Image (cartoon, rainbow, N blue to C red):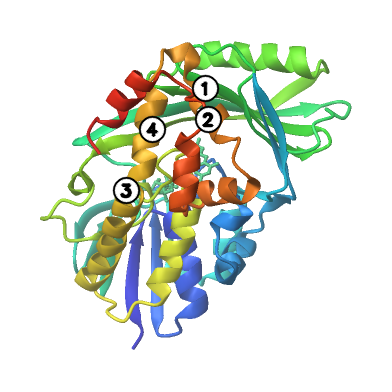
Amino acid sequence: MKRRVLLLGGGLAGGLSALALHARRQDVEPILVERGDRFGGNHIWSFFDQDVEAGHRWLVDAVGPTRWPSHRIAFPARRRHIGLGYNSLRSPDLHDALLRTLPASSLRLGREAVEVTPEGVRLSDGETITADAVVDARGGGPIEGLDLGWQKFVGRHLRFAVPHGVAEPMIMDAEVDQADGYRFVYLLPFSATELLVEDTYYSLDPALDVGLLRQRINAYVDDRIGRRFETVGEETGVLPIVLGGRLDALWPDDYPFGRIGMRGGFFHPTTGYSVPDAVANAMLLTEASDMTTSGLRRLLHDRAKRLWRERGFYRMLNRMLFHAAPPRQRYRVLEHFYHLPEASVARFYATRLTALDKLRTLSGKPPVGIFAALSAIAGRA
Ligand SMILES: Cc1cc2nc3c(=O)[nH]c(=O)nc-3n(C[C@H](O)[C@H](O)[C@H](O)COP(=O)(O)OP(=O)(O)OC[C@H]3O[C@@H](n4cnc5c(N)ncnc54)[C@H](O)[C@@H]3O)c2cc1C
């Protein structure tokens, strides 16, 4: 008899875990439950080459990322071409990969988990599924108890009648008016005539004025690209950026299930990217010896605790980014960070900064006033 693992939530983390368990554990039957009408929702999920271990790359390749060999950044006092590969996964490709790979008996689409116990779930259509292990992958949930800032954005998919001329991803173009905190524009050229343009803000206020950001995107494209386009898609996001607090807020003692994805705090503290952790957790599940609800909870909680300890530096950097300077000057923290060599930049995104990298991130001419920086750093870890 196969061990049955129920994954609640067919988004990025649940979807990748289902693919990994199906591929690597013949003794396990993953079952993926998604309340939406598509697995993955409506997202583009990006990551840098070094964010995913070489031995885990097959998992993202199973979805079929678009890959660019290099990317750019631009700040008022620093522009760089960076030879680190950048990748994007699209949610329709995750949906297709799941339908192509897993048997229909493993997939439940358009069904909500309405009653969940450590032994199984009751779905909105009345079906009851029993399982050896239940894992919660239901995306961002309530996160009281954490000190948060927000990364909020509107992204528009544009189609041009003639080539737009953007050759490689622009990860941060901060040469724009710094309204409402650190602001940058992000560009992904999916083809010569197809471009994703995102207007992003690091703000203490989660409110998103979608209409205003649309206007700013149009103004940016008119100014920098100056070619006619039509808008073929849009996504919006308000992602938490953790400044401090306690991990227990995401892992209450009385919560019996292991969590993956945003719900378990598995995202980059400064950028909000969650592909790297989603891949690492999916692979961790394939190595589990105790395939029970409590066994997987222990395994995932242990990893969450370790990452929380290791990532304290990022939370400190976030406090500088949000509190150490007036909103219009906050970009300087990242502008300064980008003086580091490419290998350090790669380690920053992969959350593997060395002690020397950390020292160099903070050394040199201070990007913000030293007293404000010290007071921001002294905030809750
Ligand atoms: C617009 C946007 C863009 C982003 N871009 C990036 C990016 O470029 N790179 C990156 O790494 N990260 C990105 N993120 C952040 C993060 O990676 C995504 O939010 C990611 O989708 C989180 O993965 P997840 O599996 O935790 O949650 P989700 O992908 O949101 O999946 C959770 C799923 O659970 C389902 N669900 C919830 N409750 C139930 C229930 N009761 N029963 C059944 N199903 C349920 C939901 O419908 C959803 O599909 C982005 C986020 C947003 C909002």
Residue topped by disc 4: 318
Indicate left or right for 39 with 266 as reference.
right
Does residue 124 appear in the picture of this structure?
no
> What residue do we see at 87% from left, 30% from top?
163
- Is the Cβ of the residue at disc 4 closer than 8 Å to that at disc 1? no
Q: Quadrant of ligand 1?
A: top left
Residue 100 percent location from the top left of the image = 60, 66
Name the one closer to the observer, 64 or 93.
64
Q: Residue at x 45, y 69 (%)?
A: 283
Q: Which residue is mark 3?
A: 263
**Label 3, ligand 1: CB separation under 8 Å:** yes
- The answer to whether 152 appears left or right of 313 in the picture is right
Contact? badges 1 and 2 (CB < 8 Å)? yes
Badge 3 vs badge 2, beta-carbon distance below 8 Å: no
Q: Amino acid at mark 3?
A: Arg
What is the C-alpha distance between the residues marked 1 and 3?
Answer: 28 Å
What label sits on residue 61 in the rendered view? none
Report which residue position mark 1 lands on: 331
Q: Earlier in the sequence, mark 4 or mark 2?
A: 4
Q: Residue furthest right?
A: 162
In this image, 335 relative to 112: left or right? right
Q: Which residue is mark 2?
A: 334
Residue at image coords 52%, 47%: 349
Which of marks 2 and 3 precedes in the sequence?
Answer: 3
